[in-house]
Image: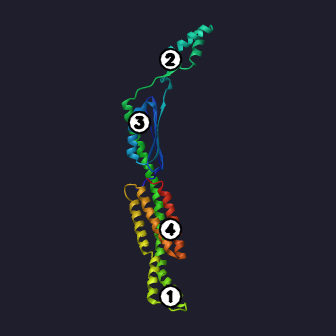
Amino acid sequence: MIQSMTGYGKTEILLPTKKISIELKSLNSKSLDLNLRVPTLYKEKELEIRKIIGQAVQRGKLDCSIYIEQASQASLNCINKEVVNHYINQLQEFVKGDAIEYLKIAIKLPDALKVEHEDLDENEWLLIAKGIDETIQKFNNYRLAEGASLAKDIIQNITSIKSLLAEVLLVDKDRISNKKEKLRKAIDDLIQNVDQNRFEQELIYYIEKLDINEEEVRLENHLNYFLKVINEVESNGRKLGFITQEMGREINTIGSKANDSVLQKIVVNMKDELEKIKEQLLNIL
């Protein structure tokens, strides 16, 4: 099943003193482009997180964010006693007052409070690693759902091209014979005599330039192969893109050889359907 390049997943982990949120989202990209935002506490695990996500996601412009919401900020902020005492001593040199007044002023001055950085707890990290796996699973499920929707539209476009190719075969059935008759009539209308053998040689050369049978067969094979690949287990947007390029070549050749207004209109419709497919494939993994 094909997967969309667009994905989203989020997991929340509730701990006694904090809530940890893990969010993963992506847009289309030719390669893996991971933008990772993690708190300072988990910086030492950044390479491991990148490896986990890279192996699971493969491709896309990804944003992964891990947030911490502390249940109590008071536990993190502590009074820097040395700095506060230093401020109080300085204040006492300038103005007279009681200790409470000095403390109210000192506590508002720079570096009066300090943040106690906690160490990474391995048990907590195991929960986060599990949360990352859950987020990736949700993310991939989102991609699969989006991919199923894209596949439905693309298959409909392929079906339209198949129908148009059937019209080409129908029109092409009598096209060559009609061209022969027109050429013969044009020759018959000429006054001078024509070498019949030379005429037949030139006619064969001209008809070969108009023949689109090989292009019709190749285009049909490409369409069938495209449907086979799009229904494979693994999503392969690049491969589908290559097949689409080959389809475009055959359609363009049919258009250049057509020399027929009805065929030209059909070819234009085929190109329109093919462009829709190309746009959709830009968002396929």
Q: Disc 2 on helix, strand or loop?
A: loop
* Residue denoted by label 3: 46
Contact? badges 1 and 2 (CB < 8 Å): no
Graded by Cα atoms within 10 Å as few (under 14), some (14 to 19) or many (20 or more), the crowding at tag 3 reads some
Q: Amino acid at mark 1?
A: Arg
Is 9 in front, or is 253? Answer: 253
Contact? badges 1 and 3 (CB < 8 Å): no
Q: Amino acid at mark 3?
A: Glu
Contact? badges 2 and 4 (CB < 8 Å): no
Label drawn at residue 270 = 4
Q: Position of residue 250 (x, y in %)?
A: 45, 68
Q: Disc 4 on helix, strand or loop?
A: helix
| Image vertical order of residue 58 relative to residue 72, above or below | below
First in sequence, mark 1 or 2: give its number: 2
* Residue denoted by label 1: 184
Q: Cα distance, mark 3 to mark 2?
A: 31 Å
Label drawn at residue 80 = 2
Q: Residue furthest right?
A: 95
Graded by Cα atoms within 10 Å as few (under 14), some (14 to 19) or many (20 or more), the crowding at tag 1 reads few
First in sequence, mark 3 or 2: give its number: 3
